Amino acid sequence: MRISADPSTDPAAYEFAHRLRVRFAETDAMGIVHHSRYLPMLEEARIAYLRHIDHPYSEIREDGIELNVLEAWCQYRKPLLFDDVVDVHTTMASIERASFQMAYLLTVEDEVRATGVTAHGAVTPAGRPTRLPTWMRDLT
Amino acid sequence: MRISADPSTDPAAYEFAHRLRVRFAETDAMGIVHHSRYLPMLEEARIAYLRHIDHPYSEIREDGIELNVLEAWCQYRKPLLFDDVVDVHTTMASIERASFQMAYLLTVEDEVRATGVTAHGAVTPAGRPTRLPTWMRDLT
Amino acid sequence: MRISADPSTDPAAYEFAHRLRVRFAETDAMGIVHHSRYLPMLEEARIAYLRHIDHPYSEIREDGIELNVLEAWCQYRKPLLFDDVVDVHTTMASIERASFQMAYLLTVEDEVRATGVTAHGAVTPAGRPTRLPTWMRDLT
Amino acid sequence: MRISADPSTDPAAYEFAHRLRVRFAETDAMGIVHHSRYLPMLEEARIAYLRHIDHPYSEIREDGIELNVLEAWCQYRKPLLFDDVVDVHTTMASIERASFQMAYLLTVEDEVRATGVTAHGAVTPAGRPTRLPTWMRDLT
């Protein structure tokens, strides 16, 4: 697999938005948010999205499915700063039998800061790939 | 820009290798290294590579150049686990006038675990894009 | 200096509470929140407290004062888990001429999970110790 | 329990030293290592100490014992900076039937930067407190 989604910079292209505030602990010595710290923000938005569509991640795990991260990609367009209030626009970008991709757009007061894509596969707790839950395949 | 490099899974394709050991603090509740924790490993390898070619990052910063991260991409093939001794194979993948891409291969006892690419731009401390240092453009 | 405050386990002893939700990225391979991840939660609550009393941290920094962390102490009583909604009860514990201590109580649905104390000193951007702002000394 | 150990600032008072290099990802917007990032350094040194005395942490876990962190305390005396090579001097400070304390001194080129103490309890994988392994109680 290789990430194919090309995330839009238009918030209207996204199903859901999750708001968070940048922590001081997320900044680095360049005075901006460290590039590795965007991925936990995408994850937080992804988990909020699943809760929003009534499939909280803890229930998915209780159903014996883990959602592995297969790939992650992020494009940093304008730095995030300490205390910025960030809207993480989030959408399902593509769904296959055993994997899916999600796209993200990060804005601060409607200004584009970053985009990202994550690709995920369903695995059993033992780590064996498995089909996505039916409700998820039905999202398309 | 969009990351174009396709990192090889053959360690021989890389100029340099940096060895590190997985910290317990880098694991998550799935029992594996959290996907966001690979990027600081790539960064540590990138900085060790620059030190290795006699251009330590602290000197680059003293010369008034910061190396921004423009994009980052990571493919997770097999999980990293606590206490794994990881070789981060590192190479310059492409060099433009004001940006460059680096490619990475992570192995544990010669087994492929992940690949990654990061794209960087040179900026002044004030954040304005600038040309790469001459020595860096001469690496090609 | 040595941290002296003994944080109460009674939420009523605290001036302010900040609510946050545990991120998956904050867990470790023991399935619980990693012990180092509590300090950014205390910091987030501290910053929310300062905002709450109309002295946002960004303004303090604009006034030329940084609040160094001199000491930090945390007692882990019952693990925090992924997705827990945590109330970080926060209070000023003591104020000296150039330093202060804050105390914290972390609860989940009123159950005590952890307590902590941080000690801070005021420094100039150059790192030289300086007196606390007047408004802060007046908090006592 | 309450941390009682008072860590020495003399490296000779410590059994073991672990060397590491500060990552850029560990710095914050004050240009120094974020205070929460010291705890993973202490943990890395603790795990290296256990490996050094031939009881690697992975073996302890395989023996069905987890070492919980009960308390952590850190005193920040002089900031750590990016690329600093840090010696984490490490010693067992006290050992009880079901818990122990370790003390740490962080130096850079023999200059004191920080001290710390962590207190630990032995628990079963199910989280129930249990006695320390015999070899550990015999360390006193």
Image (spheres, coloured by chain):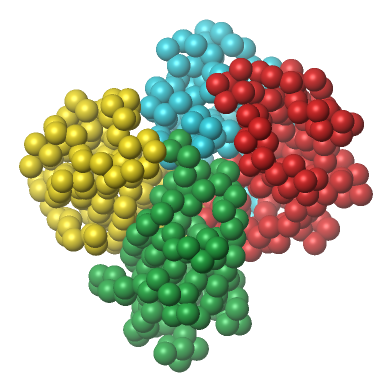
Chain colours: A cyan, B red, C yellow, D green
Give the side of residue B83 with respect to residue C72, left or right: right
- Indicate the quadrant where residue A2 lies: top right
What x and y, as percent, mark residue D106? 47, 64
- Indicate the quadrant where residue B91 lies: top right
Identify the residue at horizontal 36%, vertical 81% (top origin): D94
Identify the residue at horizontal 51%, vertical 66% (top origin): D110
Of residues B65 and B114, the one nearer the viewer is: B65
Of residues A57 and B45, the one nearer the viewer is: B45
- Indicate the quadrant where residue A54 lies: top left
Identify the residue at horizontal 32%, vertical 25% (top origin): C62
Give the side of residue B26 with respect to residue A4, left or right: left
Of residues B133 and B24, the one nearer the viewer is: B133
A89 over B41 or under it: above or below: above
D100 over C94 or under it: above or below: below
Counting labels gives 0
What x and y, as percent, mark residue D30? 43, 38
**Residue A92 appears in the picture as rendered:** no
Identify the residue at horizontal 80%, vertical 52% (top origin): B17
Give the side of residue D18 with respect to residue A47, left or right: right
D43 over A139 or under it: above or below: below
C111 over D55 or under it: above or below: above
What x and y, as percent, mark residue B6? 84, 33
**Residue D86 appears in the picture as rendered:** yes
